[in-house]
């Protein structure tokens, strides 16, 4: 059994749709023996991270940076999980209204520091959430699960 942790901050209807699309990718019938754990970023713990084999992360871009909730997740888990989870597959999405540059940089720096291995190119975009974004989120999550 493979365990995938989906940690996200999805405060709007639009970002909630992205999270649901990612979750549907983790629950595809062709992905056998996959246990999915979903945690809002403010509720995810180091124990959740240590118990998972791979990670799907999602955030809004707020004021050009990752959400405070996802930042809190990393702040409270980083040192406890850094060494034991190095090399595990992950990917993420970032949705912003205007600019995602700082959020992208933060995600790259934090996950590089963790030693996690990118299993699928991140989904990063601004503006309206369209069907193509939801399809990409589904594929992103399914690929991470298949990589674990």
Image (tube, rainbow, N blue to C red):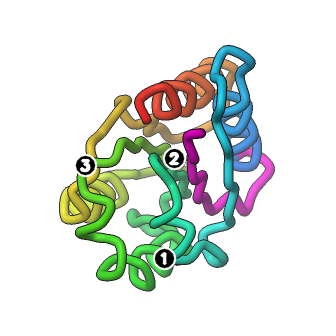
Residue occupying the far front of the picture: 1
Chain part drawn in magenta: 1-14
**Residue marked by disc 1:** 46
Residue 121 placement (x, y as % from top left): 35, 30
The quarter of the picture where the N terminus appears is top right
Residue 133 placement (x, y as % from top left): 59, 26
Per the model, the C-alpha gap separating discs 1 and 2 is: 15 Å
Q: Nearer the viewer, mark 1 or mark 2?
A: 1
**Residue marked by disc 2:** 56
Per the model, the C-alpha gap separating discs 3 and 2 is: 14 Å
Which structural element holds mark 3?
loop
Q: Earlier in the sequence, mark 3 or mark 1?
A: 1
- Give the number of the disc on residue 133: none
In the image, residue 74 lies in the stretch drawn in magenta: no
Q: Nearer the viewer, mark 3 or mark 2?
A: 3
Q: Is residue 29 left or right of residue 83?
A: right
**Residue marked by disc 3:** 87
């Amino acid at each position: 059994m493979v365990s995938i942790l989906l940690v996200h901050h999805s405060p709007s209807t639009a970002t909630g749709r992205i999270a649901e699309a990612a979750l549907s990718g983790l629950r595809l019938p062709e992905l056998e023996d996959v246990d999915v754990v979903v945690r809002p970023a403010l509720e995810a713990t180091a124990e959740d991270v240590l118990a998972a084999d791979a990670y799907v992360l999602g955030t809004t871009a707020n004021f050009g940076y990752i959400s405070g909730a996802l930042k809190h997740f990393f702040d409270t888990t980083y040192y406890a999980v850094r060494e034991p989870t190095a090399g595990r597959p992950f990917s993420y999405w970032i949705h912003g209204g205007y600019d995602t540059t700082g959020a992208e940089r933060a995600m790259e720096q934090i996950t590089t520091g963790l030693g996690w291995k990118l299993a699928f190119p991140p989904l990063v975009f601004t503006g309206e959430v369209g069907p193509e974004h939801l399809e990409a989120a589904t594929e992103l999550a399914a690929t991470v699960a298949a990589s674990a």
